[in-house]
Image: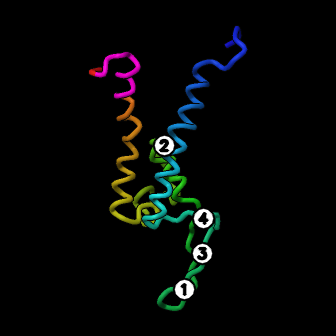
């Protein structure tokens, strides 16, 4: 890196992986999760009235985008501290399936990418 005037290949690869793989996958997964009922808002909370007539504050936030990043990056942790056990973070069976697939998607694809990079797809 010290002897060249351009970025090294690590930084080029990191930028390309972020812009061309992670960002589109996160956007797509977040949109699908929002369609399944996961909250995605900049509001910190909403007020609701219970059946007993009591006012209740329900926490919401940018859940879908954070869950998409968490699952594709296999980073762990959850927006509501209960990970995918919280009903806002896992509202339907389809969202549960998508989150399970997202955890393994990039790691499983790397086996194919390695085979292509070394020129022997059987690897």
- Residue identified by numbered label 1: 49
Mark closer to the observer (4, 3): 4
Circle 4 packing at 10 Å, graded few (<14), some (14-19), many (20+), is: few
SS at circle 4? loop
68 or 21, which lies in front? 21
Which numbered disc, 4 or 3, marks the residue that appears first in the sequence? Answer: 4
Q: Which mark is residue 41?
A: 4
Circle 3 packing at 10 Å, graded few (<14), some (14-19), many (20+), is: few
Examine the image and state in which quarter residue 8 appears: top right
Q: Is residue 21 magenta?
A: no
- Residue identified by numbered label 3: 46
Across and down, in percent, residue 7 comes to 66, 20
Residue 110 lies left or right of residue 30; in this view the side is: left
Which numbered disc, 4 or 1, marks the residue that appears first in the sequence? Answer: 4
Instruction: Quote the CA–CA distance across marks 2 and 4.
Output: 22 Å
101 or 89, which lies in front? 101
């Amino acid at each position: 890196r010290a002897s060249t005037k351009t970025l090294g290949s690590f930084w080029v690869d990191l930028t390309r992986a972020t812009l061309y793989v992670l960002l589109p996958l996160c956007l797509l997964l977040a949109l699908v999760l929002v369609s399944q009922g996961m909250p995605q808002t900049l509001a910190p909370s909403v007020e609701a009235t219970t059946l007993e007539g009591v006012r209740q504050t329900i926490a919401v936030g940018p859940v879908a985008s954070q869950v998409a990043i968490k699952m594709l990056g296999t980073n762990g942790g959850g927006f509501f501290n209960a990970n995918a056990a919280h009903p806002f973070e896992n509202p339907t069976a389809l969202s549960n399936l998508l989150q399970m697939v997202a955890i393994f998607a990039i790691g499983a694809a790397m086996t194919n990418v390695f085979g292509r990079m070394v020129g022997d797809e059987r690897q």
